[in-house]
Image: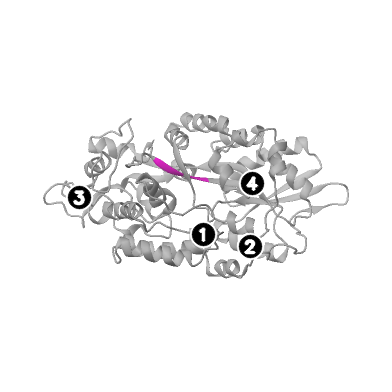
Amino acid sequence: MQLSTSRRKVLSALTVGALVGLVAACGGSGDGNGKTTLTYRIWDEQQQKGYEKVFEAFKVKHPDIDVKIELQPYDQYWTKLVTEMVSGTAPDVFWMTPANFPELATQGGLMDVSAAVEQSGLTKDKYHPNVVDSFTYKEKMYAIPKDWGVPGMLYNKQLFAEAGVEMPTEPLTWAPDGSGTFLPLMQKLTVDVNGKHPNESGFDPAKVKRWGFASWNHSGTQWLNWIPSNGGTTITKPYGTFNFNEPASVEALQWGVDLIEKWHVSPPAEQTNPPAGRATEMFQRGEVAVFPANNALLPFVAPGSTFPIGTASLPAGKAGRVVIINGLGEAVYSRTEHPDQAKQLVSFLATPQAQAIMAEGGYVFPAINDLAPRYVEHWKAKGIDTQPFLDEARGKTVNFPIVSGFAAAEPKINQIFNDMYLGSVTVPDAAGEAVKQGNALLTPEK
């Protein structure tokens, strides 16, 4: 997830209160006949199909409100949104991420929707707690809990069969020194053109036929999970600062690099560093047996795959299996011309009726806890068991780092970590520099 230069400039131009007191928005419209059209902006064309069904149900209950879905590519989404907020032309309702939430909530760009959650008929404890926490600021909710994604592992069953191994039913384990059950399995799956494995004499890492695992510079599926699993932390506190340069965190970062440089079970970073998608393509081509991925990737990977896909939980470290929950919210622009209608819409999106449509269509794990099994049932009917993802979400979890300024800091961290995965800078030095440069872009609360 890289930020464009223009977006960074827009974000850096914002000051406290910059989004407050602007002219009213013109995202939606009224036709003079008592009807209102709301603009609802998203970035996922797969989910658009599900939301078209959701809004058909919404229309039955609210015949005077039309909803126009606006699809905006993700790499343009935030730049356009922030620019529109400044100019007063933002859409009425839009998707929100934990990474971007702190800046927009603290600067007045989002409407308090706490009452809309209550009007949905459910109490907050019915939604996944990580998603609720991610969109709560000073005890008020500024986005409705929409869904959540969690990283696990996709694996190529055909390559497992060729290697003569099976994915254990018990969770795999890892440790910085290479002990545990994860690394030996990846060594069996990795093989060079001469049939040698990384733990055998004569193995040539420059001529690998098949890699066991894809360790690469991706925060959400990689190091943001390795760190808490090893007992480390990424931030001091919500709305605080980065601290992933401390010993347990550095150990976890070193583990991710060692899978490439020391243990030779993952492809070199020259083949996987961002732009995103290169590691995914290696998995789809059958060059990588196990691919760490968020469940949200399934609709994009599964349809085009020529081999059966299995799923598994991420390995457990010394602190256990700890994964990051990356939930989305439904936010209302603070200056919308149609606050009452927009709140009615997000209140409906928080209901079991709306979230069941998205779960049963296999689009997302819904934020409502009791509906999550319906997502599993959808994928089970297609031959893919997503229960490991749900098991993870019900276990030890952490939030995506909630710091004000993450979106601006992320490109700096990514740039430094690209070099770290390439081996051109040591892990301790990279962690220290990333924390230093990242914190310089944050606005922590005292």
The answer to whether residue 281 is above or below residue 149 is below
Q: Amino acid at mark 3?
A: Asp
Instruction: Estimate how packed mark 4 is, as few (under 14), some (14 to 19) or many (20 or more) residues with alpha carbons within 10 Å.
Output: few
**Which comes before the other along the chain, label 4 or label 2?**
2
Q: Quadrant of the C terminus?
A: bottom right
Q: Is residue 41 at least partly visible in the picture?
A: no
Q: Amino acid at mark 1?
A: Phe
The residue at which mark 1 appears reads as: 406
Which label is found at residue 384? none
The residue at which mark 2 appears reads as: 82
Check if mark 3's residue and mark 1's residue have beta carbons within 8 Å.
no
Instruction: Estimate how packed mark 2 is, as few (under 14), some (14 to 19) or many (20 or more) residues with alpha carbons within 10 Å.
Output: many
Query: Bounds of the magenta span?
Result: 322-326
The residue at which mark 3 appears reads as: 192
Display colour scheme: one colour
Residue 325 inside the magenta-drawn segment: yes
For discs 3 and 2, the disc positioned in front in the rendered view: 2
The foreground one among 304 and 20 is 20
**Which comes before the other along the chain, label 1 or label 4?**
4
The residue at which mark 4 appears reads as: 139
Task: Work out how far the residue at label 3 is from the one at label 1, CA to CA, in angstroms.
Answer: 40 Å
Check if mark 2's residue and mark 1's residue have beta carbons within 8 Å.
no
Query: In the displayed image of the protein, which residue is found farthest to the front?
Result: 446
Q: Amino acid at mark 2?
A: Val
